[in-house]
Image (cartoon, rainbow, N blue to C red):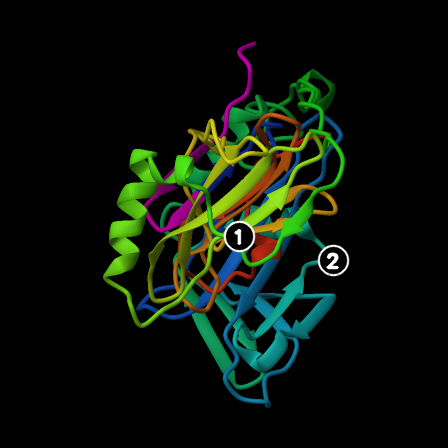
Amino acid sequence: MNSPLTETRKFRDWLAVCDNGRDCFAFAGPVDGETGWLRIAMPAGPDAMPSVWAGLAAWEETAGPLVIEVDGRRWSTGVSQAQDGGDLGSEGVVTEDVGGLIDALARSRSIRLVAGDQAVVLSPSGGAAALLWLDERQERLGSTAALFRKGERAASSVPPAPALPPAPRASGSAAPLEGRRAPAAAELLLKVVACRADMADRKDLEIPDEGWRLPDGRHLWSVPCFVGADNVGQVWTVTDAAGGQSRLLSLPGSRQPAEETVNGEFDPATQTLTAFAKGRGLGDCGILSRWVWTGDAFALLEESEMRECWGAPPEAWPTTWRTR
């Protein structure tokens, strides 16, 4: 069996994702530009059980417990709550007859999320194909453990979840370099030159460089690179203690490395870098990543990504990279 890789597919109006540990997710999205979502999560392995979680925007306080309606049949949710400020509305997790709901979703003609007087219509188009793809990725096809295309093959024949890579370990703790600017050696890097030019066009904003003294004495620098409506980009460099030998850092991802972070924040106590690239101001789509400084580079700790702005909070996004 080949090593599992993160993969994302779109099947008409459904989004499907499998991460590096072969945990898989299928999302149903709304029609007519509304805000609502339904997530089917299926962990890897023969004994894994699926879960269904859904949410919709609730712009009024009258919204009640969330109900999932498929072709007129209703499933209640055992956990329901309003998000802070009501921006992401009500959400709930199905606690009974999860398998029956998934079977209904795979064959559905209509899907609605209902909370009180509010309702959002989700698209059934692509649901069967998305679930079939999940079964294929996890090698469940034709088994009793399949989500969609079940068969007589025993669930024990489904391969176990692959081993996750070990979590990177920090090399110690860092200390902030207060009120300083990246040294001249960093200014010679072509990427930093381009960033300075881009930021010069935004004289209305004053975003300072940030620096930290690493455990081995070298300095880590964050240099602002661009500004958008909801995002601020940075590049990261390392110099020696004297400010020389500057090196641009690459940030590994689940699919490919990047030279920039978006809304990046470094915690010197844990040497953890967190980035939240928002797809829009609501923060219901984008990429959320965490890296750890291991002594000479940043190593990816975890990543989740939601490519569709359907109202899902970050904790509901599909994972694209995990460590153990």
Q: Is residue 12 above or below residue 22?
A: below
Q: Report the quarter where the N terminus lies.
A: top right
Query: Residue 209, how many percent across, how many down?
Result: 47, 53
Q: Which mark is residue 210?
A: 1
Q: Residues within 10 Å of mark 1 (few under 14, many from 20)?
A: many
Query: Residue 304, how many percent across, how many down?
Result: 54, 44
Q: Which mark is residue 95?
A: 2
41 relative to 188 in the view: left or right: right
Q: Quadrant of residue 271?
A: top right
253 relative to 142 in the view: left or right: left
Q: Magenta includes 3? A: yes
Q: CA distance from mark 1 to mark 2?
A: 47 Å
Q: Which mark is residue 6?
A: none
Query: Residue 11, how many percent across, how many down?
Result: 36, 42
Q: Is residue 19 visible?
A: yes
Residue bounds of the magenta highlight: 1-15
